[in-house]
Amino acid sequence: MQALAAAVRIVAVLMVAMGLLWVGQGLGLIHWPASSFMLDERPWAVRGALLAVAGIGLWVAGGRLVRR
């Protein structure tokens, strides 16, 4: 059960990190990679925010999995 919880938390952290990257690219704050189609595209900021929130939710669910 501990291994599953650790795997869930790793995925959650990756989701939050990727979501924040998408938000930064969508808002034009992060220009990496320079040829990305996501730069200055607001829909990607929204999608990134949703992905980050889902990652936080997964983190919380993973914490509850450990307690059971």
Image (spheres, rainbow, N blue to C red):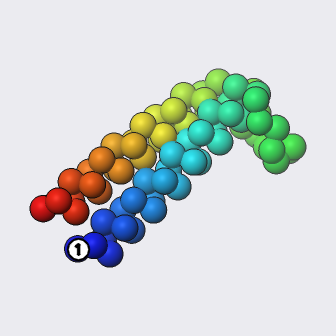
Work out which quarter of the rendered image holds the C terminus and state it.
Answer: bottom left
| Residue 24 quadrant | top right
Mark 1 sits on what residue?
1
Q: Residue at x 54, y 28 (%)?
A: 46
Q: Is residue 20 left or right of residue 65?
A: right
Work out which quarter of the rendered image holds the N terminus and state it.
Answer: bottom left
Q: Residue at x 58, y 48 (%)?
A: 18
Relative to 45, does residue 37 appear above or below in the rendering? below
Q: How many numbered marks, from 0 up?
A: 1
Front-most of 42 and 1?
1
Relative to 40, does residue 7 appear above or below in the rendering? below
Relative to 63, does residue 40 appear above or below in the rendering? above
Provide residue 48's location: percent of width, then percent of height: 55, 37
Q: Residue furthest right?
A: 34
The answer to whether residue 47 is visible is: yes
Front-most of 19 and 47?
19
Q: Is residue 12 left or right of residue 4?
A: right
Q: Residue at x 46, y 35 (%)?
A: 50
The answer to whether residue 41 is visible is: no
Q: Residue furthest left?
A: 68
Front-most of 18 and 62?
62
Provide residue 26's location: percent of width, then percent of height: 68, 30
Q: Is residue 46 left or right of residue 37?
A: left
Provide residue 31's location: percent of width, then percent of height: 82, 38
Q: Secondary structure at mark 1?
A: loop
Q: Residue at x 42, y 46 (%)?
A: 55
| Residue 44 quadrant | top right
Provide residue 58's location: percent of width, then percent of height: 34, 50
Q: Is residue 56 left or right of residue 48?
A: left
Label 1 is placed on what type of residue? Answer: Met
Q: Residues within 10 Å of mark 1 (few under 14, many from 20)?
A: few
